[in-house]
Amino acid sequence: MNALFTIAGHFIDPNTIENIEPLGNGLINDTYKIMVKGEDNPKYVLQRINNAVFTNVEMLQNNIEAVTGHIRKKYENQDVKDIHRRVLHFLNADTGKTYVVEDGKYWRVMDFIADSYTYDAVTPEYAYYAGRSFGDFESLLIDLEEPIGEIIPDFHNIEFRLKQLEDAVADDRVGQMREVEVQKFVDKIREKAEQMCLGERLYREGKLPKRICHCDTKVNNMLFDNDGNVLCIIDLDTVMPSFVFSDFGDFLRSAANTGDEDDPDLDHIHFNMEIYEAFEKGYLEGTASFLTPLEKELLPYAATLFPYMQAVRFLTDYINGNTYYKIRYATHNLVRARAQWRLFEEAEKALL
């Protein structure tokens, strides 16, 4: 704990710190709340950046500073109240940067937004809020001129993910391709590949733009106030240039699934059109100022693309010997891939 006080002391006066305690249960970064003497609520949030996932921390923080600075300036021009609660604010360290490095680990501190809440439940109401909020987020950044780097290259590039699958099939390093089911699964993916690579082709033809997107659209990446109103979008580590499909399709991949991501019973898995329609309604409202007719037309495609892509990624990891995703049993990634493929089929049936 003394080490955390030392790290926090790069950002704030260590003599003011009362205590530092764990906060939340994030899967990527380690997060703590900093209690300041004389205050009942946490004052700051201390976070270790997982530089195994985000290898270019300088780019990561530059992206976040550019995005939050741009949104803050827009809110100031619009005379928005409580701006400090509407957009994240990261503190400068004594290094002059918004992060420090201690023993090879990267740390940052941001203001704690008091009286704010997150929700995990995905209801039509919250799906609408999510669509509107992530659409508004993209809209606020549509005129951002400062360059934003691709923090995880090819993160949502289906052609890249299919190439990874083909490499895994060719290597067959642990002999999984001897399984008849796996070979048939690969064949089914190949049959749909040309159809699912439509976005990348349109981009090369100059017909489809890339926007500044959040790229991790979940209900619990929004903060709500006491009255149930959305305060701000959080967890900005994956903000980068992408197709709007990233924010639209990735949300629905999890939110519109009536089963679990790794559900072994495929009969549980259907595509929830009520969630889709609520999210789409909010998203179209939030993006009304800039979304092109082609982008609107392809939103159903986006909702099918992401379960397809995730099936490809899970199957690739299974063929490679389960080297990327954590598993609880030997065939876990294959079960995940089957579940995502069923969701893809259900979404395709409902939308295309």
Image: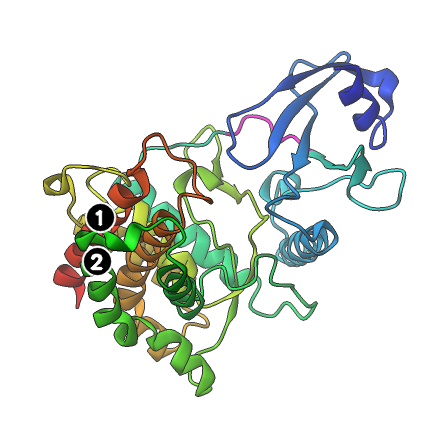
Instruction: Kindly identify which numbered label has been placed on residue 185.
Output: 2
Could you tell me residue 12's position as x and y percent? 83, 28
Q: How crowded is mark 1: few (under 14 residues within 10 Å), some or many (20 or more)?
A: many
Secondary structure that dominates the magenta span: loop
Name the quadrant containing residue 329: top left
Please identify the quadrant where the N terminus is shown.
top right
Q: In this view, does 103 lie above or below 317?
A: above
Q: Helix or strand or loop: what does disc 2 sit on?
A: helix
Extent of the magenta region: 111-116
In this view, the residue farthest toward the bottom is: 205
Q: Residues within 10 Å of mark 2 (few under 14, many from 20)?
A: some
- In the image: residue 241, left or right of residue 162: right
Mark 2 or 1: in front is 2
Amino acid under label 1?
Answer: Arg
As for residue 103 lying within the magenta part, the answer is no
Label 1 near label 2: C-beta < 8 Å? yes
Q: Residue at x 89, y 42 (%)?
A: 95
- In the image: residue 35, left or right of residue 122: right
Amino acid under label 2?
Answer: Phe
For marks 2 and 1, give the CA distance: 9 Å
Could you tell me residue 104's position as x and y percent? 77, 37
N-terminal-most mark, 2 or 1: 2
Could you tell me residue 208's position as x and y percent? 43, 79
Pick the residue in front: 342 or 33: 342
Please identify the quadrant where the C terminus is shown.
bottom left
Q: Helix or strand or loop: what does disc 1 sit on?
A: helix
Instruction: Kindly identify which numbered label has been placed on residue 338.
Output: 1
